[in-house]
Image (cartoon, rainbow, N blue to C red):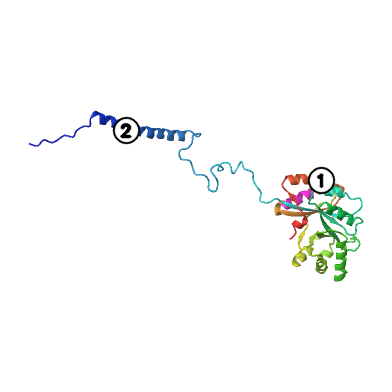
Amino acid sequence: MTLRREPQEPDGGARSTFRTIAVLTLIPVAAFALFYVWSWLSPSAPHPFPSPPTPHTSPQLATTEQSALPRVHASRPRIVLIIDDLGFEGQPLDRVMSLDPNVNCAILPNANRAAEFAEKLNARGYEILCHLPMEPQGHETPGRNAILTSMSDDEIARATRENIERIPHARGMNNHMGSRATTDRRVMESVLRALPHGMYFIDSRTIGNSVAAEVAREMNVRTAARNVFLDDDERESAVRKQLAELAASAERNGFAIGIGHPHPATMRVLAEELPELRARGFRFVRASEAVR
């Protein structure tokens, strides 16, 4: 008779080894489970499975990029500031030059100290414009050697060149008065043909239907047009209002041209307000940097 062999139970040493392995295996599993539960219950605890950072940001900047870092503007609004009608005895030229290194100075060719002002401004590095006298629609007198619509093309060209020669170091030109002359295409073509190569023309826009800038573009003469007159009304409150409009125009468009005169109120307002505009990020530039 064959006897069935019963399975042998492990001896005592084997059972002890098995229990030891089981305990060592369960300890880290239990510890991890406790840590996982604690991390969810405690907001300040490090999460065992942190979320990935937002795309295109580093993990360090993911929570601070929108709030702590300063905003950087791609470009600063530019302002071209032109002071017209310079060149006369008694004008505060030193105050004009103290406004900003990039203030642009438009000198009248028929002024009694025109050449002297031009030399002094050039020596200090300021940009100079020939402030060309041109015929207005009213009865105002634009001055000696002005450009008139009654002139022939040759007369206009000759008068333009003579006016430029009276302003040494002039890099550009803008019109003095000219509400009639700048609406006449033939007159503007004759003026612009007489400009030396590289000289630009800024349309002061003394009238809304001026064709000066349009004709200049057609003739490939670098040009731009005035946006704001600062001191048609010479009261300080009016000048401040117009300066604010100039700044607003520059903010809207990235660039604006303002024209003022060496009146006492204008000089006071500009001396007070230009440092504030610079602190706000506005950049004053030479006219030659703005024409196209």
Nearer the viewer's eye, disc 2 or disc 1? 2
Left or right? Give the position of 255 relative to 86: left
Mark 2 Cα within 10 Å, few/some/many (few <14, many 20+)?
few
For the residue labelled by badge 1, is the local secondary structure a helix, a strand or a loop? helix
Depth check, front residue: 106 or 237 = 106
Q: CA distance from mark 2 to mark 1?
A: 87 Å
Q: Is residue 266 above or below residue 172?
A: above
For the residue labelled by badge 2, is the local secondary structure a helix, a strand or a loop? helix
Depth check, front residue: 283 or 245 = 283
Q: Quadrant of residue 189?
A: bottom right
Regarding residue 224, the answer to whether it shows in the image is: yes
Q: Is residue 70 above or below residue 17?
A: below
Q: Residue at 30% across / 31% down in the picture? A: 19
Q: Which mark is residue 271?
A: 1
Q: x, y (%) of residue 98?
A: 82, 47
Between disc 2 and disc 1, whose residue precedes? 2
Q: x, y (%) of residue 244?
A: 76, 48
Which residue type carries mark 1?
Ala
Quarter of the image with the N terminus in it? top left
Depth check, front residue: 212 or 87 = 87
Quarter of the image with the C terminus in it? bottom right
Name the residue beneath numbered marker 2: 21
Q: Is residue 112 above or below residue 160?
A: above
Depth check, front residue: 2 or 217 = 2
User: What segment carries the magenta color?
Assistant: 241-250
- Please say whether residue 270 is one of the residues in the magenta stretch: no
Q: Residue at 85% across / 70% down in the picture? A: 153
